[in-house]
Amino acid sequence: MRTPHHLDAHPRPNPYEELAALDDGPLEETSLEEFLTEERDAGAEDAWAPPDHRRGGKRRRKNRFAGLPLAVKAVVGLAVLASFTALGDRWAVLYAEHRAADTLKDRLDLAAAPEVEIGGFPFLTQLADKRLDSVKVTVPDVAADRVSLAKVSATAHDVTLNADGLTSVRGADVPRFDGDVQLSFADLNRELGASQVRFTGEGRDRVRAHGTLPVAGHNLRVRAEARIQRQGERGIATEIGKMRLDIGDLATYRPGTRASEGLHLTPKGTADLARETRKAKALLSVPAIVQRMGVPEATVREALADDGKLAELTGSPRFARQAAGLNLIDLALDNPEVMRRLGLDPNLLDSLSDLTRPVLADRLSLAFELPEPDQGDVRLRDVRVEEDGIRVRVSGSGLTVGR
């Protein structure tokens, strides 16, 4: 039998009635504008703003600097003062270098102002003492006889100024200086070679010239060697040797009067005589040529009458040596037709006879001389051939500039 449920004596309260008991009555009427105004006021009172660290940071930095020792402040002040002093000193140097460059350009009649570099520091102290530690002057493109010097650079030491302040320098005394003179191959190629002859270094004291040389309407290959040496105390001389002009592969001309000089057939030219009967007969038909070569007359008559004998004669090593030793310049005037048959232009041979060793050497000469100063002494110390040109070391003493 199921046990019956017991009912509570006090029933549970109704939750809706409890909610009704919390009611304070009807809401008061409030406009939307008043509600929003109250919200803004409340937000203004509660708004968050970040702390102002800037003013506080400045105050802290100011306080930190103010707290530095007096010695540190003095060092900082001296550093700032030294910076401004150095800046002013450098400005004064630039101004002085500019004035010196313009003065040298006018007095030396240069096409462009040189580069001037004043050494030593501080400059203003040197100017007050009227003495400069060093002054370097670089002058580009200086005319020297037939050639141009690519660059002349000199450094003067212990210069004494004749001046009344920075803007009134009247002159200077140079007790000693040293420098370099450069003669570039590029300038030599342009001024001496007329864009046809090139100069290149060959060892420490030699320059090789090679290219083409126009002679009587023919472009002949030219080769020569110049030995560079000092001449006196201010000059550079060149001894031109091994001069040679090639007329194609036929002949070679070497100016001079020795047996090995003049116009001679090349090995290829003498070999052509053995292969070309017409050229060989033209050469052997001139008695003067036969006598010069030392060929017996009977042998020549047999060769002219029989082509086999001719080929035997011209093909021998002895004939090749005799033909190569023949100076064609001596025979050109009297036998122009024979020269034509050999393939040589008589007009060219006439021009070659005038192209003597001194004439050809003068066209390839690299010599120049430094000007002699009115006061003092200038000397060449060393001459050296380098990759890009000829470099000469100079030195001097007792020079006076201006006044």
Image (cartoon, rainbow, N blue to C red):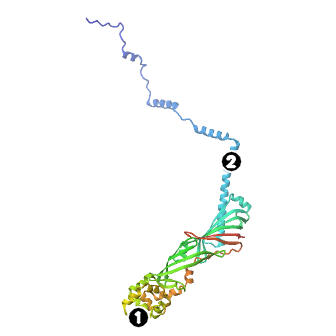
> Residue most toward the left?
1
Look at the image and tell me in which quarter the C terminus lies.
bottom right
* Residue at 53%, 79% in the rendered image: 242
Secondary structure state at the residue bearing disc 2:
helix
Find residue 19 and report its horizontal and vertical position in percent: 39, 18
Secondary structure state at the residue bearing disc 1:
helix
Question: Three-letter amino acid code at disc 1?
Answer: Arg
| Mark 1, other Cα within 10 Å: few <14 / some 14–19 / many ≥20 | some
Q: In the shown orientation, is residue 99 left or right of residue 53?
A: right
The dot on residue 77 is: 2
Question: Three-letter amino acid code at disc 2?
Answer: Gly
Q: Which one is in front, 151 or 286?
A: 286
* Residue at 68%, 70% in the rendered image: 396
Q: Which one is in front, 163 or 158?
A: 158
Find residue 393 and report its horizontal and vertical position in percent: 63, 69
- Disc 1 from disc 2: Cα separation: 112 Å
18 lies above or below 245: above
* Residue at 72%, 62% in the rendered image: 131
Q: In the shown orientation, is residue 389 left or right of residue 178?
A: left
* Residue at 30%, 7% in the rendered image: 5
53 lies above or below 279: above
The dot on residue 301 is: 1
Find residue 374 and report its horizontal and vertical position in percent: 70, 74
